[in-house]
Image (tube, grey):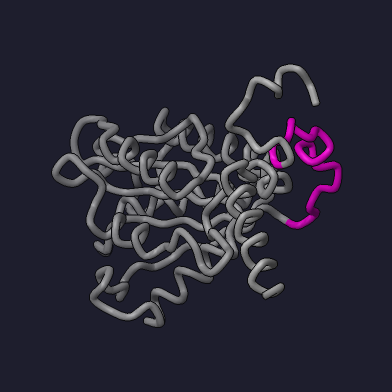
Amino acid sequence: MSESRLDLLNIDTTLFQPPDTARLLAPERAGHAPRFLLLYGSLRERSYSRLAAEEAARILRALGGETRMFNPSGLPLVDDAPGDHPKVQELHALTQWAEGMVWCSPERHGAMTGLMKTQIDWIPLSVGAVRPTQGKTLAVMQVSGGSQSFNAVNQMRVLGRWMRMLTIPNQSSVAKAYQEFDEAGRMKPSAYYDRIVDVMEELMKFTLLTRDAAPYLVDRYSERKESAEALSKRMKQEAI
């Protein structure tokens, strides 16, 4: 035992592990295209958060990713329907399928929309022993009807941390979104579009960098300790 460990009186040294570079660098890399789920926060026919998310999806596919987009129409309010509701089950399946996510919300009354929050609230922190979002990457984006703001992306960053996701540093905020899309719903060339490209490039790189090591990145001392204590308790019960 190293001298530095002798001073950590509250630590179970059998469960305290220095970083394992072999596991961290994950020499075996997955060969499939990175998988991304995109969520948007408006149901309007011409939804600028959906149009921005669609542009993000096109960029991710061009970078070599696979994308799926969840249509929140028909998703009930949390606690207003059982968990086996078809739209809830669809969202859960897509969440488990994805290795990274993009959340794009309008800013309404200085915050993300209720629809955006409802989708996130329906995503469970855990399903049995599986945490569907833990260790997955996340990029946040918002659109505004007026001047540029960052209220929605800041709120979504808090939620991403709460969902134990790896939220990338870059983000996108499109001001006066009604001016940034043509009649066909495609985004016009602009610094706002270039920023979305930046964000998707970064999301792809972070996903490729972390997806194979994600289980190790979120392996925690406290949870190893809890698991060891539960196993010890079970073994004692079986011995009775």
What residue is drawn where x is 38% and y is 53%? Answer: 51
Considering the whole magenta stretch, tell me its main secondary structure: loop
What residue is drawn where x is 52% and y is 67%? Answer: 94
Q: For residue 239: magenta?
A: no
Decide which of 220, 106 is in the foreground and name it.
220
What residue is drawn where x is 37% and y is 46%? Answer: 159
Q: Which quarter of the rendered picture does the C terminus lie within?
A: bottom right
Q: Is residue 187 visible?
A: yes
Could you say where residue 22 lies in the image, as x and y percent from the top left?
Answer: 84, 37
Decide which of 202, 11 is in the foreground and name it.
11
Could you say where residue 150 lies in the image, as x and y percent from the top left?
Answer: 29, 32
Q: Which residues are magenta?
A: 15-32
Decide which of 32, 13 is in the foreground and name it.
13
Q: Which quarter of the rendered picture does the N terminus lie within?
A: top right
Query: 29 left or right of 109?
Result: right
What residue is drawn where x is 49% and y is 46%? Answer: 164
